[in-house]
Image (cartoon, helix red, strand yellow):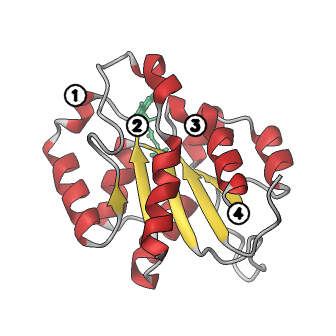
Amino acid sequence: MSEPSDRVLYIVTCATPAARDIGKLVTLAQDSGWRPFVIATPSALRFIDQPALEAQTGAPVRSEYKEPGSPDVLPPADAIVVGGASFNTINKWAAGISDTLALGLLTEGIGLGLPLAALPFLNAAQAAHPAFGRSVKELREAGVKVLLGPEGYEPHVPHQGSKYLYRYPWHAVLAAVEVSRA
Ligand SMILES: Cc1cc2nc3c(=O)[nH]c(=O)nc-3n(C[C@H](O)[C@H](O)[C@H](O)COP(=O)(O)O)c2cc1C
């Protein structure tokens, strides 16, 4: 068991089958000395085991913006990773849309200069859409480590994503923010 750390990591997850395994990334982060918190997109709530993640992190899973005037629930992040980054969230992040808490944190994270990394989970048909290539390029130019390709995730054959979850490289997205910190 690693010692509790002051390094706060926000783990964002989206509405893809990878979200079902987001607890694996929480464990890896804890073992690497991070204090991780989970932020799910509203659609991702259907994929995750929220009570299990709350027990694992000792904190609420956030998915909605707080009420105006209410205090922040989570400590500020030192880095943010997106595990199971959806086609939708990647495109909206690049376009500067912040209509979910997850996107609000991610879009602000660029301006704050936080270490940011995203491990996509999408199929080859989604990845072939012209907007996706533009989004990945723009996010990389803004300093986000988008782990698409041999060093991260190769888009899967449509409708077969769940088959590839066993080899989803969760460790890579953590390593990417460790490198950013160096
Ligand atoms: C069963 C199921 C599986 C899905 N798998 C994926 C996927 O692997 N990758 C992806 O980008 N979207 C996938 N989607 C579509 C997303 O859930 C959808 O685009 C959603 O709006 C994403 O919202 P979010 O980016 O706010 O999480 C899937 C949807 C369902 C219902």
Q: Secondary structure at mark 1?
A: helix
Residue at position x 69%, y 60% in the image: 36
Mark 1: few/some/many CA within 10 Å (<14, 14-19, 20+): few
Residue assigned mark 2: 121
Q: Amino acid at mark 1?
A: Ala
Is residue 14 among what the camera can see? Answer: no
Which mark is first along the chain, 1 or 3?
Answer: 3
State ligand 1's quadrant: top left
Estimate the spatial distance between the alpha carbons at disc 2 and disc 3, rounded to whole Å.
9 Å
Mark 3: few/some/many CA within 10 Å (<14, 14-19, 20+): many
Q: Nearer the viewer, residue 61 or 172?
A: 172
Q: Amino acid at mark 3?
A: Ala
Residue 54 percent across, percent down from the top left: 81, 49
Residue assigned mark 1: 125
Q: Say if disc 2 is inside 8 Å of ligand 1.
A: yes
Disc 1 and disc 4 in contact, CB within 8 angstroms: no
Camera-side mark, 1 or 4: 4
Residue assigned mark 4: 33
Residue at position x 57%, y 37% in the image: 19
Q: Is residue 74 left or right of residue 109?
A: right
Residue assigned mark 3: 19
Camera-side mark, 2 or 1: 2
Q: Nearer the viewer, residue 34 or 53?
A: 34
